[in-house]
Image (cartoon, grey):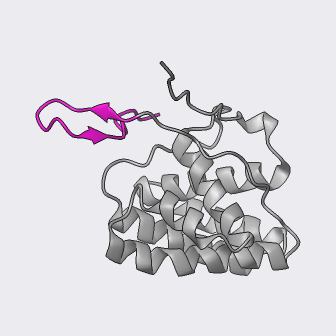
């Protein structure tokens, strides 16, 4: 009998600088969205400082579309956390896949959170963010996709991803 084992999700310190920067950016964006509006300006300033301001604008728009259209919880840690969630891992992987022209992979990852209409809006925005990062000299490394075993939630009997944990 075989079993699917989740891929190991590397922690923050095991990642390249661009991955750490993107994770910090996404986490900071979530803080700004939740209750700290000044964090949005901090994120824009950081992208401008590394001469990738256009990428920051597109990432901001993509994160807004994710927040508005997400079905379920997208697990994002605080900016100081050294652990990386499977969702964060896959969000960075979306950008890496789009830099390589792999829209099928990126779309499949985003489809875990977005219904089809929201996916059609978010995918081109994330593509623009990925390409702007690449044009600024920041290739995002490809990693293995995080494999999440399906869980059955009480009541419906249908396999679903467990997205009930928050940091």
The secondary structure that dominates the magenta segment is: loop
Seen as rendered, the residue at the extreme left is 155
Please tell me which residue lies in front, 43 or 119. 119
Q: What residue is rendered at 60% in x and 70% in y?
A: 59
From this viewpoint, which residue is outermost toward the front? Answer: 1
Query: Residue shown at 17%/35% (left/top)?
Result: 157
Determine the image quadrant of residue 45: bottom right
Along the horizontal axis of the image, is 46 left or right of 57?
right
Asked which quadrant contains residue 121, the reply is bottom left
Residue pictured at 41% horizontal, 35% vertical = 166
Placement of 13 over or under 37, stated as above or below: above
Indicate left or right for 140 with 113 as reference: right
Residue 164 on the magenta segment: yes
Identify which residue is drawn at 50% across, 54% down. Answer: 30
| Percent position of residue 58, x then y | 61, 77
The percent coordinates of residue 107 (x first, y second) are 51, 67
- Residue 71 placement (x, y as % from top left): 30, 57
Task: Report whether residue 77 is seen.
Answer: no
Q: Quadrant of residue 51?
A: bottom right
Q: Which residues are magenta?
A: 150-167
Q: Which residue is at the front of the view, 109 or 132? A: 109
Q: Is residue 11 magenta?
A: no
Q: Look at the image and tell me whether residue 35 can be seen.
A: yes
């Amino acid at each position: 009998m075989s079993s699917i084992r989740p891929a190991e999700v590397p922690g923050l310190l095991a990642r390249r600088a661009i991955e750490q920067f993107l994770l910090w950016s996404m986490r900071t964006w979530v803080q700004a969205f939740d209750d700290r509006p000044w964090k949005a300006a901090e994120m824009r300033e950081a992208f401008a400082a590394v001469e990738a301001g256009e990428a920051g604008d597109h990432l901001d728009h993509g994160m807004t579309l994710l927040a508005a259209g997400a079905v379920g919880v997208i697990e994002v840690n605080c900016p100081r956390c050294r652990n990386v969630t499977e969702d964060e891992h896959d969000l960075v992987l979306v950008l890496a896949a789009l830099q390589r022209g792999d829209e099928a992979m990126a779309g499949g990852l985003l489809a875990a959170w977005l219904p089809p209409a929201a996916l059609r809006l978010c995918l081109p925005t994330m593509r623009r963010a990925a390409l702007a990062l690449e044009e600024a000299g920041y290739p995002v490394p490809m990693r293995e996709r995080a494999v999440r075993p399906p869980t059955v939630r009480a009541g419906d009997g249908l396999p679903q991803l467990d997205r009930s944990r928050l940091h």
